[in-house]
Amino acid sequence: MLQVIGIGFARTGTTSLRSALGTLGLGPCYHMLDVMSDHRRVRQWLDIARGAEPDWDRVFDGYRSAVDWPVAAYWRELADAYPDAKLVLTVRDPDSWYDSVRKTIFKIRIDPPRGPARIGARVAEALSPDLRAFLAMTRETVEQPLFDDRLADRAYMTSAFTRHIEQVRAAFPAGRLLTFQAADGWAPLCEFLGTPVPGRPFPRDNSSADFRRTTAPYFARLVYGPLLRWTPKRRSR
């Protein structure tokens, strides 16, 4: 049963919030990295994007909190499904946010690789059903419904980012919603959640500079996972 739902867009400190919630005893915390780590979760979200009735308790089985995309793309549905959950809206400057997503999450979509790297990417997608499902899932839960596939349009993207913040703030009372920046540190988050302030610095995880190193093992799992799961069939005698 989710107790905390992060409904801010990715690249607003969601990985840091994930670590912070774990420190506060509100983990495990569901994140896009958890989706990438299990091909079954990828397909759960793809089915939801294509109209399947979501069983949220099954999606978040074993988790006490959830942040990042695709969670934040379904903020209305999840707030209704878990009416007692506290909501945390992570925010940052819109242009700074766009600079970050352009350099990280949406980099390949906006500036596709060329030459041998492009060929390698196409081969990986052709060979891996998990990678194809993940790319379809991100398009159908985030890129199309939130941004109309206009990822290279800074003005449109920052407008969508700002509109999301305004819609969320208008939808919930202050007692249920905290607007939060990682730079705010522990105090407002702990006060909102009713937890003691830890005696350690607030996490600063998955910066733009660290993004590739952080996500590389998860993409490798998507690419090579089907091969690792494959077992040859025994011939009948």
Image (cartoon, helix red, strand yellow):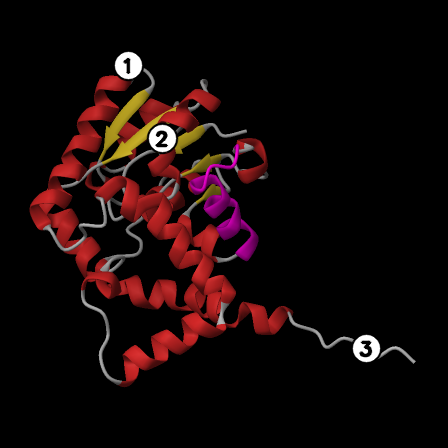
The amino acid sitting under disc 2 is Trp
Which of the two labelled residues, at mark 3 and mark 1, occupies the earlier sequence position?
Answer: 1
The amino acid sitting under disc 3 is Arg
The structure residue drawn at horizontal position 29% and vertical position 78%, both measured from the top left corner, is: 118
Cβ–Cβ under 8 Å for marks 3 and 1: no
Q: Residues within 10 Å of mark 1 (few under 14, many from 20)?
A: few
x and y percent of residue 29 in the render? 46, 42
Disc 2 designates what residue?
75
Residue 42 falls within the magenta-colored stretch: yes
Point out the frontmost of discs 1 and 2: 2
Checking the image for residue 173, the label placed there is 1
Mark 3 and mark 1: Cα distance apart in space: 60 Å
Is any part of residue 169 visible from this angle? yes
In this rendering, position of residue 66 left or right of residue 201 = right
Point out the frontmost of discs 2 and 3: 3
Residue 162 falls within the magenta-colored stretch: no
The quarter of the rendered structure image containing the N terminus is top right
Q: Residues within 10 Å of mark 3 (few under 14, many from 20)?
A: few
x and y percent of residue 201 in the render? 30, 46
Give the quadrant of residue 168: top left
Q: Secondary structure at mark 2?
A: helix
x and y percent of residue 210 in the render? 28, 63
Checking the image for residue 25, the label placed there is none
Magenta highlight range: 39-53
Which of the two labelled residues, at mark 2 and mark 3, occupies the earlier sequence position?
Answer: 2
Q: Is residue 24 above or below residue 95?
A: above
The structure residue drawn at horizontal position 40% and vertical position 32%, both measured from the top left corner, is: 5
Checking the image for residue 234, the label placed there is 3
The quarter of the rendered structure image containing the C terminus is bottom right
